[in-house]
Amino acid sequence: MRRSDRFHERRRGDRKRPRRPDAGTLPASSGSRERSRDVGPYNRELRELLAGIGAPKPAPFQPDPFQLEALAALESEDVLVTAPTGSGKTWIAREEIRRLLDGGKQAWYTTPLKALTNSKYAEFTEEFGAERVGILTGDRKENSDAPLIVGTTEIFRNQLFDALRGGDEVRADMVVFDEAHYLADEDRGHVWEEAIILTPTRIRMLLLSATIGNAPEFAGWIS
């Protein structure tokens, strides 16, 4: 046997086997079982308490005063709505669009992003029916003669330019500018400015934003 073999043989023989736990030693998991038994009654009390509370009864939707005020104002003037995300700005647009479509009129809904446009198109298609909703972006053109068109702000601005050159009119009785704070965007803000300026006075404008800080000044500019 070579020296190195004897060395490794001796080293293997020197290794100690792990000592078995004493008979009186509890496994590590027993403590957690003890604790789980201790908190068991509290869990039962919590479940009983929650079961007694129950779920709230369904109730009809009640719009907030600012939503009703915006709808009333849209009958005679342009409206800017500034409110936090999730507070119900889109509800105002949806209800006004519903009123217009039911009256045989037309509307445009603009967004700054293709992804948001696609999302709103799917939402409104489900809400109003596929035959009443179209979409216009740089990538999609579907049902462009529908009474409700969802598209990017650039497409709406381009339609305004085309109508101005050709002496035609944009087919809309109201336009919604979602994410209207893009007016302040350094690169694309001119698109919103041009669209707002070129929109004929016969077309009501509804501007929605969660982040416009100078709302009174903004509203004064569009009025």
Image (cartoon, helix red, strand yellow):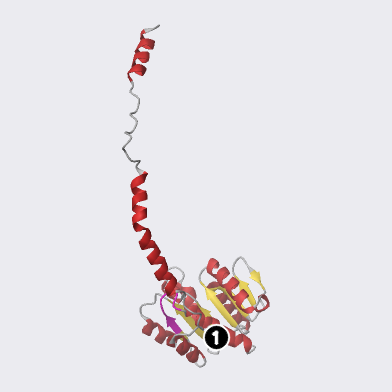
Residue 165 appears at what percent x and percent y?
60, 80
> What residue is rendered at 50% in x and 71% in y?
112
- State which quadrant residue 213 falls in: bottom left
Neighbours of disc 1 within 10 Å: few (<14), some (14-19), many (20+): many
Is residue 50 among the parts visible in the rendering? yes
Residue 123, position as x, y percentages in the image = 58, 73
25 relative to 59 in the view: left or right: left
Q: Magenta stretch containing residue 202, yes or no?
A: no
Left or right of residue 164: residue 37: left
Looking at this view, name the residue that lies furthest to the top. Answer: 1
Q: Amino acid at mark 1?
A: Glu
* Farthest-out residue, front: 24
Identity of the residue drawn at 65% across and 77% down: 129
Total numbered labels placed on residues in the image? 1
Q: What residue is disc 1 on?
A: 96
Q: Is residue 184 left or right of residue 143?
A: left
* Of 133 and 67, the residue lying toward us: 67
| Mark 1: secondary structure | helix
For the N terminus, give its image quadrant: top left
| Image: magenta residue range | 80-87
Please identify the quarter of the rendering in which residue 140 is found: bottom right
| Position of 166 relative to 43 (above/below) | below
